[in-house]
Image (cartoon, coloured by chain):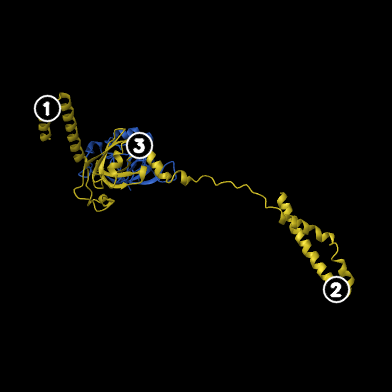
Chain colours: A yellow, B blue
Amino acid sequence: MATSSKSMRSLSCWKQILRQTRAVRQQQFRTLNTTPISISRFPGPPPPGLSRPRASQQDVSNRQPKKMKVYPPPPSARAVCKDPIAAVTESQLGKLDPTRARTRLFTRSNLDAAKVGDILLVRTKNGDDFAGVCLNIRRSGIDTAILLRNNLTRVGVEMWYKIYSPNVEGIEVVQRREKRARRARLYYMRKPKHDVGSVENIVRQYQRQRAMLRSADVKSRDANSTKKKNNKRGSNK
Amino acid sequence: MVNCIDNSGAAVVECVKVLKMKRHAKIGDRIIVVVQKQRNFGPESGPGGSVSISAANKVRRGDIRHAVVVRTAKKVQRPDGSVVKFDDNACVLINKGGEPIGSRLNSIVGSELRDKKWSKILSLAPMHL
């Protein structure tokens, strides 16, 4: 408030000064023309109205500019964390996929990764497993999701599953596509011409095989069987 | 036009009103339908249907009935982030009291019905997802 009032005063002073100088000049001019006596009056003490603001002005010029306190800028978030989104994703992945098995299953660089066109089986916590042809893999960090399509009771069903969802217990590749799909999204498989139909049979066969393998493994482990026996079993499969 | 998946005798029905709301119907919503096409119990009947002729057509073409939507071609997102989408829209006819008219269903239904308290339809269905 004080500064503003001062500035206002100084401005008014300037006005006053200008007005007075103008008046003085006119007067001087006139006096010069008319009576030389008045000139001797001017080198003497200046008029009180003129002197005061001039003095104050000198004061201001003499005074050092007031030191203002300069605060340092707040610490930049960029310096603390270069890429917060990546960091959050990483921490979430650490929580939801500690072994990074899912990540590996869907990274592009992994040659054994699941790709579109493969038949995938999603095992869920509540027991409703869903298998289907993978039409689309939506890769976006922790939101990575897969679109599976299957025919259940002759009705086409499509499900999006978040691969890192805690409700998803496991994702298995049941059958790979023989040839690499030349599209990233196999939406054409919704058309009757390209629809693979139900994959239940393939999945059931796969599950039977898995069960056999597992039981064989368990048996061999339980019986502490010899290597020869194991080999035989392996050949049988 | 909505498929009717029970053995009430209707094959294709048309939705004329969605009850209790001013928007489209979702799975588990009650609608009013007009029976457009009757099911002829021949080769067209579904695999799980095997509808006996004794359970004859309880509804006729042109009948106005209540029904519950059980499948939508529109994607439905579940609370866990998974999304389900069926290839068709389907419904099950019910009477005014909410009891299904047919005695069996011949195809899959969405499990959103459980949240909407249609457990009777869920138990009739051969499968739910």
The answer for how far apart the CA atoms under marks 2 and 1 are is 133 Å
Residue closest to the eye, B81 or A201: B81
Residue pointed to by mark 2: A32
For the residues beneath circles 2 and 1, the answer to whether they share a chain is yes
Answer few, some or many: residues within 10 Å of disc 2's Cα (few below 14, many 20 plus, some between 14 and 19). few
* Residue type highlighted by circle 2: Leu
Residue closest to the eye, B11 or A114: A114
Chain ID of residue with mark 2? A
**Rendering coords of residue B88 (x, y %):** 30, 46
* Residue type highlighted by circle 3: Leu
Left or right of residue A118: residue B19: right
Residue A226's label in the rendered image is: 1
Can you name the residue that lies furthest to the bottom here? A33
- The reply to whether the C-beta atoms of the residues labelled 3 and 2 are less than 8 Å apart is no
Residue A189's label in the rendered image is: none
Left or right of residue A197: residue B1: right
For the residues beneath circles 3 and 2, the answer to whether they share a chain is yes
* Residue type highlighted by circle 1: Thr
Residue at left offset 74%, top offset 58%: A11
